[in-house]
Image (cartoon, coloured by chain):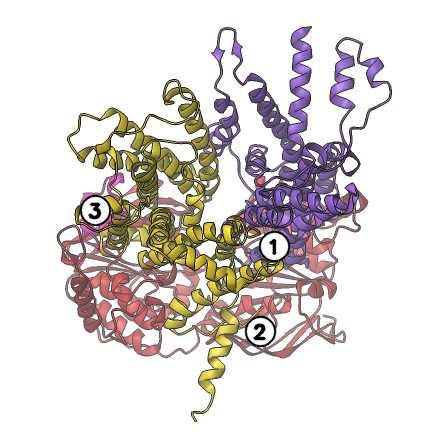
Amino acid sequence: MEWFDAFIVVFASGMRLAVPLILACLAGLWSERSGVVDIGLEGKILVGAFASAAAATFTGSVWLGLLAGVAAAVVFSLIHGYASIDQRANQIVSGTAINMVADGLTALIGNAIWSQGGRTPQLPAHAQFGAIIWPFANEIGAVPIIGPIYQHLISGHDIVTYVAFLLVPLTYWALYSTRFGLRLRAVGENPAAVDTAGISVRGLRYGAVVICGVLVGLAGVYLVLSQEGYFQPHMSAGRGFIALAALVFAKWRPWPALGTCLLFGFLDALAIRLQGAELPVIGSVPVQAIEALPYILTVVLLAGFIGKAIPPRASGIPYVKER
Amino acid sequence: MAAQAPPAIELIGIDKSFGPVHANNNVNLVVERGIIHGIVGENGAGKSTLMSILYGFYEADSGEIHVNGEPVRIRSSREAISHGIGMVHQHFMLVPPLSVLENVMLGAEGGPLLAEGAGAIRKRLAELGREYGLVVDPDAIVGELSVGLEQRVEILKALVRGAEILVLDEPTAVLTPAEADQLFEMLRVLKSENKTIIFITHKLREIMSLTDRVSVMRRGEMVATFDTASTSPPELADAMVGRKVILKVEKGPSHPGPVALEARNLVVRDDRGVARIDGVSFALREGEILGVAGVAGNGQSELLEALAGIRPLSSGEILIEGQPVPAHELNPHMERLLGVGHVPEDRHRVGLVMAFEACESAMLGFHREPVYGKGLFYSRSAIVSDAEKKMDAFDVRPRAPLLRTANFSGGNQQKIVLAREIERNPKILLVGQPTRGVDIGAIEFIHRRIVAQRDAGKAVLLVSVELDEIFALSDRIIVLCGGRITGERRPEETNAQDLGLLMAGVSERAA
Amino acid sequence: MSTPLKPLPAWADVALIPLVNVAAAFVISGFVVLAIGENPLEAVQSLILGALGDLEGIGYTLFYATSFIFTGLSVAICFHAGLFNIGTEGQAYIAGLGAALVALHFGFLPGYTLAIAAIIGAALFGAAFAAIPGYLQAYRDSHIVITTIMFNYIASAIMGYLLVNVLRKPGQMNAETTPFGDTALVPQFHEVLAHFGITWPVTPFNLSFLLALICCLAVWLLIWRTRLGYEIRTVGANPTAAVYGGISPARVTVVTTLLSGALAGGVAANVILGDQHRLILEFVGGFGFVGIAVALMGRAHPVGIILAAILFGVLYQGGQALSIDMPKISRDMIVVIQGLVVLFAGALEHMFRRPVATLLARRTTQPPI
């Protein structure tokens, strides 16, 4: 059973690594389903992370930290929204700008305030989200198979993790079972149809952009308040782009997004685990190969070699009313 | 019928301009309740603009709208819907990946949760299916439906929203004849339920067989309204075409030589895979102008693109001077080398690059030729002087090769295209809508140059939706309808009414 | 719906609007400086002094500018074809591999032909790495923006693996290759000037700068004076017209990305062959992304790119001095400015168009005094 325990450990760590991916991926899903392409997820994770770290440091409150992180990411989302929706900008350019400003600004302000090269002070335990231990986790943990699954995979995560996993069915439900979701799916495919049905294209897209900001802000909050306990420049480390890859891979659908993010998180955990390890038969696996796998898989998928990922038809195209 | 009730729609003095284009000029229209009212007119007559104003997509610059006798302001589609107006657009306003039910619900969901309204709408769809024969599977994905069914979904969308007045914009343009017959059947049933239907078309056959009253638009104005029973296709065609300034082009008899271009059984499909040219054959001789008449959207564009090598042939053969052109040579570059010049229908989107200097637009397609510089680099002076030569030859104003293409007037832009294609001395000249959006002076000039090409022994194929242009220039006319040739005439043996009927797909013996 | 704008006069379009946009980026940057409790004017002074105050500063400024010219050209040439290449970063990185492989294994080449071969190697590797997303865009319909983002990370993984496991100098901890031989280097200016008896402080500023200027001229000639350039611009401005004109947009896409990747390779010439003299991890350091800002600010024109690259060179070098003078303003400030330039000169480029047009209209309708 040694391999099983090892598997559980890697899987549990993969789950934790997947949480920010899931949040950012769902954020991208909301935005792009409405027709606003968002390559600025990476930057908004950083903004959310930094604002939550700063607020939690100053107030000592984890909840104010969460609020600040989400609010800051929403502000950046709205800048992108204004450029994309009202100014009909090139959304790629706008997203690139958001990434750069976020990357620089968080490090700059962090350094200006705490003079530690942009790092924020370590938060005390009460200003972080703690693990929630489910009833009898330790007792049941002794039971073979089910025990470790209960103890390590189901129990023992923090609130943001549970929220992230709950957001998947919630997104699914909102997208497919609510009026807003229907309109949102429609506006990303054919905004003229929405307009002629008497619904505001602009309003819907702004709504989606705000939701995107909330979710991607949570991803940043998670990095600081659930994982590290401090902010560090560039700490998003490409997660925003992996989330983007996962979104393409999941073909802009919530459940496959969860699966893909778990897969990518698991690959990441595996890469950490296999660092320097010698495997039987294969020998040592280059960690970089596993790290690059999500990107390679996404390129292969985009090229139509395994199925075809077709983005929402109107994504990236500003809506201009015309004949 | 219902003589005492106020009319369903009354439009008074509607005026709308888009920049310099006066799309609707003081338009008045009365549509009585419970009838099918047709609106006919040529392309660009202003029908769609008028209906977009009625549906709140545009706001009129001035004028009044009365619905059921009450003056109303319609500033958005939502307001139009609330006044009981529904519209079936020419390009369907549907979301292909969504189901029929979802498309119908969009904007009429009946509550924040879909489940609340879905049941009611499902029921309503079933009712409408029973009442009007409008049966569609509510769970089918719209993108997988046939065009006829998609249109049915559009109609259902309007009815579910409680439309009492239904506007259909060119509804048969995309339908097969069988689908069109089904549509007419549905519309008659709707009429019998006291719905009012405004039916926009340019097909006279449909007007005659379907409508109760018909209004004719021409160049942004409403020129006449008839009871359908008391009018005739010739009278309508006359009103549609009007007494335009007859552009007389000095033109001697033609002296056709050997066949320069031959099309054999061409089949050309559009991007959706629909055959837009369906078994067309003709021969074009040196020293003649062959006019291709037809209502826009009947395959002329695809024919022109296929002949120019832009759109691939699905089947059939093109022969240039008796030699079949192999498929791999059917591209614009090879065709230019074979001596085919092409003035495309749309100079903005296709024929010119608006962002370029005029001299650069004036070499598009010929940019590989050694006149523009023999070595690795272009010679700027060669490009500019070549453009100046062309501009002189075609009297382009201003004579400014360095001015951006977009800054020239429509007529002068068109002259640049013509100069480019003609000055390279092609054997065959394909010309699409040569005078669309061009001022009168330039029209005359362009017409004279096209005739001059013929007199120089060139084979000219002229595609135009302007009948006078076809009459003024052609030595021989073929008429396209639904991707097929419905007739061939000599201009001296025919008239506008006769061609109008051929264009409408009425059989050969008519008129 | 807004009323259509009257076209602006050409001078306003070419010069005024871009200047207003860039000015907006700098004004906001000033507010950022103010917000973290420093005086923006003093900051500018310190920045300019650090970048241009002495020959050493100027040397470093031009060294950075050289890289930015290359990445700016790389991004700009794709703009002309209507393509957004975010992959300049990764292409430059892989180009470093090409430079290093030639420098380390082609030692038999006589004299400075080795350095030239290494530069060619860099260009070829950069081009090849860019051509894959180009090909996928042209023939497999996958969006070049997404693929180039992915390729940046793939480049990073490839280089990380190779430097750690394959190319690393034996018995060394750092992930870097053995130093190149003397003839594989691009000479630095202070060495060259020493031949003429001129002393110039030791800086990494090297002859790649001349190569960059030559590339600017070459790109200008290519875009505005050759058939290929004409085809590239036609595809970028109006793909339908391109097809009508017998131009294959797919072919042009692939060729343009090849050229773009080759230009990105210039960074490897400048940094690897001109300064580091060995292949190191992450030597591109975000210069590829600076290229986006440079290309947007320079309006994809080589002259504009040179000016924008020098401005960013000043920011990068001066930013270092600034971070010493005013420790609160770390070098991250430069990334903020870069982002704001992309935002205002790129995404929001039309935001000031209406106010400027209104202002100009008002001025011209005033009665003459």
Chain shaded yellow: C
Q: Residue furthest right?
A: A135
Q: Are tags 3 and 1 found on a single chain?
A: no
Q: Residue at x 28, y 45 (%)?
A: C206
Chain B rendered in what hue?
red
Tag 1 secondary structure: helix
Callout 2 crowding tier (Cα within 10 Å): few <14, some 14–19, many ≥20: some
Name the amino acid type tagged 3.
Answer: Ala
Name the residue carrying label 3: C194
Residue B440 in percent (x, y) is at 34, 78
Viewer-nearest residue: B151 or C42? C42
Tag 2 secondary structure: strand
Name the residue carrying label 2: B226
Read off the magenta span.
Answer: B322-344
Report in which chain the residue with disc 2 lies: B
Q: Which mark is residue A81?
A: 1
Q: Residue at x 51, y 33 (%)?
A: A308
Name the amino acid type tagged 2.
Answer: Phe
Q: Tell me if residue B22 comes above or below residue B374 in the rendering.
A: below
Q: In the rendered view, does B231 fall on the left or right side of C287?
A: right
**Residue A36 is one of the magenta-drawn residues:** no
Q: Are tags 2 and 3 found on a single chain?
A: no
Residue C275 in percent (x, y) is at 33, 39
Callout 3 crowding tier (Cα within 10 Å): few <14, some 14–19, many ≥20: few
